[in-house]
Structures are given as C-alpha cells and as structure tokens.
Image (cartoon, grey):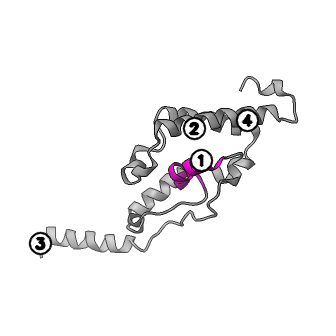
Amino acid sequence: MSKKKKFLILLVIIFIIIQFIRPERNIGKRETENTIFVSNEVGQILQTSCFDCHSNYTIYPWYTNIQPFGWWMNHHVNEGKAELNFSEFETYSLKRKLHKLEEIKEMVDASEMPLPSYLWIHGESTLTAEQKEILSKWVDETSKYLVDTLPRKKEQFQSL
C-alpha cells in the first residue's frame, strides 16, 4: 500500500474518531425576560440576530453535528456569551449594563454584529436599517431608564 493511501486511511480514521468528541450544547431557556424592558419587536430582533451566540440557548444548525464544525460553533458561542449574555444581563452591575448597551449600539451601527461568518448560514439574521434604528432607540431608552431610576446618586453615573 502506498504512503498516500495510508495517509488517506489515517485521515478518515481520525475524522471518524473526532465525531465522538462533541462539545457540550448551550441549551438553556430561550427568553428575553432577563434582557430588561424588551418590547416584542426588540425581543424578536434579539432572538433572531443575537441569541444564538449571546444567550444560554443556541439553535444548532445541522452542520454542528459534524466535527470540527461543532467545536468551531461552540468556541464562537462561548466567546459571545463571555462578551455579552442576555440570559444573565440582569445580574450585571449597572456600570457593566450601561457599557454593554453602548457596545451593542456601536457594534450594530458598525455592522460588526452579527458576525459575517454567522450571516453566511443565517442570512435571515442580517439587520435591516430599520432594525438597527429600533435597537439603537432601545439602547438609548434602556440606558436612560437605568440611570434615571437609580436608587443611588445619578451624578456618579453621568460620566458613563
């Protein structure tokens, strides 16, 4: 048997073996109630365009059952949740909430989110200009509400 054929057989064996090494799935409860003050319209936008990577619930496409694609997706989900997790948003400090809201606005306005690699397969998650405006308004209103309803002195947060 040639070296080339042995190498191909080895690759096939490795490919088969890695199919049994699967990452843990991110399947919690899909909800927007922890995203504070979300209208149905904003909630639908967040669910369609953000929650797969930024919540405790991911809808997995078929290709994530094939490794290494599942690992790649798991890595993206873990990175996304570490940066912003809507399922745990209410547990964030006020300063962090305000910062994350501002980051949402910046990333959406710059078309940096959702990620282009995510949009290749999930084209329906592309944000329209109208949806970006809705999210921007939601960020502004939510930030204002958080600052205006603080039990502490507002002055210490005005610079945020």
Marks 3, 1: nearer the viewer: 1
Which residue is found at the position 51% from the left and 52% from the top?
48
Q: Give residue 62's quadrant in the image.
A: bottom left
Start-end of magenta stretch: 39-55
In-front residue for pair 108/127: 127
Does dot 2 land on a helix, a strand or a loop? Answer: helix
Q: Is residue 154 visible?
A: yes
In the image, is residue 86 above or below residue 58?
above
Q: Which mark is drawn over residue 95?
A: 4
Q: Position of residue 158 (x, y in %)?
A: 76, 24
Q: Earlier in the sequence, mark 1 or mark 2?
A: 1
Q: How many marks?
A: 4
**Is there CB contact under 8 Å for labels 3 and 2?**
no
Query: Whole-Å distance between the Cαs marked 4 and 3?
Result: 63 Å
**Is there CB contact under 8 Å for labels 1 and 2?**
yes
Query: The C terminus appears in which quarter of the rendering?
Result: top right
Which residue has dot 1 on it?
41
Marks 4, 2: nearer the viewer: 2
In-front residue for pair 23/86: 86
Q: Is residue 45 magenta?
A: yes
Which residue has dot 2 on it?
134
Q: Earlier in the sequence, mark 3 or mark 2?
A: 3
Q: Earlier in the sequence, mark 3 or mark 1?
A: 3
